[in-house]
Amino acid sequence: MKSSSVQRLVAALCFFVTLRSAAQPAEAPSGAEPPETPGTARARLLFEQGRLLLDDGHPEEACTAFEASDALASNIATLLNLGLCHRASGRLATALDYFEKAEALASQKGDEERKAAAAKDIAQLRPLVATLSIVVLDTSDPDLEVIVDGKARPRTTWFVGLPVDSGRHDVVARSSHREPFRATLLVVDGVAHSVVVPPWQPPRAKRPPTAHPPTGEAGPAQKIAAITSGALGVTSFGLAAGFAAAARVAYDDSSPHCTVFDVCDAKGVSLRHDAAADATRANIALAIGVVAAASGITLWFTLPRHPHPSTATRVGVGAHGVAFEGQF
């Protein structure tokens, strides 16, 4: 029944706009533009369709109409309504982007009323938006590029938490001389997320078979590296816990300044920003700790070992795997 009602309203609107266009040129939204062209008339019609759909509880269809209208003739009202429909659809980062575009256009055109309306929506929405930062541990490769959801992420924003919509996101780090790094994460609104791109390790060269394993204290450098990596991992875990606690405190302190719908005053917004920043630092420290701890464990358990006094062994690496040969 609701869908039929919307269709009747849209059909009636189309008929009304057609009669009005035939009778006289329609006024532009600002009241200061020249008579409408067929493109701007179509944009106006799509805008009105979007308003009907949004008011009738169909934000997805409304976004489609507003986006088509914006492609024909962009204006402040269309951008504001794109923000509203995307927010109603749960795409908070996309909504924030449209509100910021509306604020910029309103400032450019001197429309203080709509600029203030956009600024209010931005202030309410920003603490609720998730962010994603890319932590690249080795930035020395000039050919390295990071792709997020099929779009290249500029190097200047790798370590910056940029707004992202909730849901699944795919991250790929690739270069001309390395295997690509891939990661998939599920983003939750209001949380600062990060993806750590580890340094690239070239493949190890194959060792020829040796008749006798080395004697004495083997692998001192590897042992030092293992201990150092482990210590770095423990330190990073401690930092992550500290930052997480700070984020929790800042978020709790903001509660008296925010409503149950997460609408905050200036103090609440500031505290939410501090909480998000500490959460980002905690995620980065945790990711570095995981990488360092894993590296330390791997280095420690791959240390060369002393041969057993009553055992002589030979180890060879071939095309089909590892061959062991021994005498007991």
Image (spheres, rainbow, N blue to C red):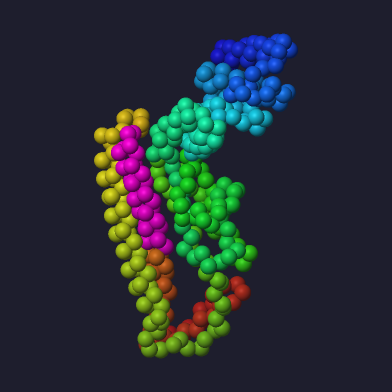
Picture coordinates of residue 112, whole percent (x, y):
48, 29
Image-quadrant location for residue 261 = top left
Compared across the picture, whether 143 is left or right of 244 comes to: right
Question: In the rendered view, would you say 21 is above or below 256?
Answer: above
Residue 287 within the segment the image draws in magenta:
yes
Picture coordinates of residue 142, whole percent (x, y):
58, 65
Who's the residue at 36% across and 77% down the image? 224
Picture coordinates of residue 229, whole percent (x, y):
37, 69
The reply to whether residue 44 is visible in this rendering is yes
Picture coordinates of residue 200, whole percent (x, y):
52, 67
Question: In the rendered view, would you say 302 is above or below 173?
Answer: below
Who's the residue at 56% across and 72% down the image? 203
Who's the residue at 37% across and 58% down the image? 285
Q: What range is drawn magenta here?
A: 264-291
Dominant secondary-structure state across the stretch colored magenta:
helix
Compared across the picture, whether 79 is left or right of 132 comes to: right
Which quadrant would the C terminus be assigned to in this image?
bottom left
In this rendered view, identify the residue nearer to me: 118 or 171.
118
Image-quadrant location for residue 65 = top right
Question: In the rendered view, would you say 248 is above or below 15?
Answer: below
The reply to whether residue 63 is visible in this rendering is no
Residue 129 within the segment the image draws in magenta:
no
